[in-house]
Structures are given as structure tokens and as C-alpha cells.
Amino acid sequence: MVKMKTGLVGCGNIGADLCIALQKGSIPAEIIALTDTDTEHANVLLRTFQLDAEIVGLDECASRADFLVEAAHAQAVKDVLEAAIKHHCPCLIMSVGGLMDVLDLLEQVQESGVQVRIPSGALCGLDGIRAAMEAGLHSVTLTTRKPPKGLVGAPYLEEKGISLEDLTEPVMVFEGTALEACKAFPQNVNVAGALSITGIGAVDTRVRLIADPGATSNSHEVVAEGAFGRLQTITENMPSPRNAKSSYLASLSACAELRAAAMVFVAARG
Ligand SMILES: NC(=O)c1ccc[n+]([C@@H]2O[C@H](COP(=O)([O-])OP(=O)(O)OC[C@H]3O[C@@H](n4cnc5c(N)ncnc54)[C@H](O)[C@@H]3O)[C@@H](O)[C@H]2O)c1
């Protein structure tokens, strides 16, 4: 059976969830190369899932693979896109917020013809946003609500000296554009990136981020208005089984994108 050779960049939580999905055998893909800034993380995946893969650098990973999966960090996105262009390798970018820093590079990606998959991640409703864009949208607002511990370490909170310890009631810690949100919370609001790219862009999409000590899930509410009417979606995410800071649906969206890419690959190979 033909399988899509996949290079994995970032061997953490989502990487492990992809390995679990691949083990089940219904996705026609296999991981043949792994890259991580912490080699031990790559080693753990190699050992745990007994992968027939090698730990290599990013360039080597892209040169060997039919498809690259970035599941690392916003800061990895630029290098992954450059490697994808150089080796004409289609890719999936999980750290969607990182795309906001490299919007110029996205134009080069388009010119190169390399396909970049953007996952819906931990968000529902992007199908409606995409369709509504055909007639234009007037406004798109994302309100994200997370338990305070899910926001620990965000650069914005550290710069502003905002402590979320001892919160007793919900506090809006950020309100601004999606562009600002992705820079302020690069590991927390990837969904804002996906929403803006699908919809009216990162400058016009509004984001509110609420730290809620009573929240038991990461929830995202999208409200959009346009020629089509008005939509409102609410996604209440269970945490990922292996990483309480991440939403399980994000990992599942990575699996779904890998499956879709692999099906296209296999179909093209006849
Ligand atoms: N699109 C979404 O909705 C969504 C949802 C959750 C997470 N994410 C993003 O996906 C990415 C992976 O998430 P995770 O939960 O697996 O994180 P994780 O922290 O569990 O794993 C990340 C791994 O990448 C490695 N890494 C960090 N920087 C790297 C670099 N520059 N090059 C190579 N490896 C690097 C780390 O050592 C770690 O092993 C994160 O950027 C996260 O923000 C996106």
C-alpha cells in the first residue's frame, strides 16, 4: 500500500497524537523523519511508537518527505515554510499564530505553488466563514475563555506584569486585533490566526481573551456578520489527554488534515 512519507517538526503533544492516529492504520501515511529542538523529545516518540524513522535536521526532513507537519512553535513556522518552498514539499502548519509574523513569506508560498494546510484547530465554524466571505463579512469577533493556568507564560502577561494567580472571577486580559493577539499570546490563540486567514484578515478580526478561574474548558465563541446574515459558534474544548493546556480538538484537526493530505497523495499516485 502506498503511504505518504511524512516529516514531523515538533515531537510534543500533537506529534504524539499524530503517532497514535497513525498507529491505528487507517491514514495512508508514515512518519519517516523527525525534527525537534530537543532531540530527547524526538527520541521519546521514536521509542514509544517504534517508528521506522530518523531524527534529522529540518532541511533533511523536508528533502526526504512527501509532506511536512509543523507541530512545534510559532517561531518554527518561518523555517518550515522556507524548507517547504525549497523542497517543494506541501505542509501542515499547526502553529497558525506564527503565520502572522511571516505574511510576506505566504506570498512566496503562493507563488511557489506549495500547498500549506491551515487546520481548523480548536475552533468550529470556519466552513461558514469561508462561504460567507464570498459575499463579504462586516465583522468577525472571537472571544476565547481559558482557565488562568492555560495562559501561564504568555509574553503579553509577563511584559505587562499581569498575574493570574488568585483570580476569583473572570477577567478580560486582552482585547485587540487578531494580529496583536497572535503576537501577545503566540501559544494560546492559534485559532485567531486560522479565523483571520479564512475570514477578513488579522487586522480586522477582533479578539477578546478572558481568564476565567471557573472555566473547565477552553472555549471559543465566534460571532460574524455579513451579507449572508449572522453566525455564532461556540466550541467548548476538552483538554488534550496528554497536555491540559492544549485542546483535544486541535490534535484531532491535525489528524484530519494529515488524513486528507494522505488521501490526496495516494489518489494522485493512482
Ligand atoms: N491550531 C491550533 O488550534 C493549535 C492548538 C493547539 C496547539 N497549537 C500549536 O501547535 C504547536 C504544537 O503544540 P503541542 O501541544 O504539540 O506543543 P508541545 O509543547 O507539546 O510540543 C512542541 C514540541 O516542539 C518542539 N519545538 C519547539 N520549538 C521548536 C522548533 N523551533 N523546531 C523544532 N521543534 C521545536 C518542542 O521541543 C516540543 O517537543 C504549538 O505551537 C501550539 O501553539 C495549535
Image (cartoon, rainbow, N blue to C red):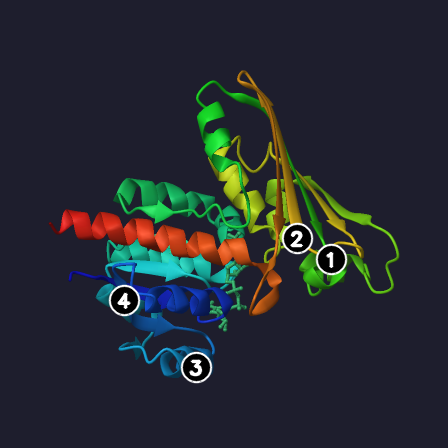
Disc 1 to disc 4, C-alpha distance: 35 Å
Numbered label attached to residue 30: 4
Relative height, residue 163 to residue 233 (above, below):
below
Whether ligand 1 has any atom under 8 Å from the Cβ at mark 4 is answered as no
Amino acid carrying label 2: it is Asn
Q: In which quarter of the image is residue 83?
A: bottom left
The residue indicated by pointer 3 is: 44
Q: In which quarter of the image is residue 254?
A: bottom left
Q: Which residue is drawn at 37% across and 77% down?
A: 49
The residue indicated by pointer 2 is: 218
Amino acid carrying label 4: it is Glu
Residue 10 visible? The answer is no
Numbered label attached to residue 249: none
- The x, y position of residue 58, in whole percent, is 34, 68
Relative height, residue 89 to residue 46 (above, below):
above
Relative height, residue 244 to residue 48 (above, below):
above
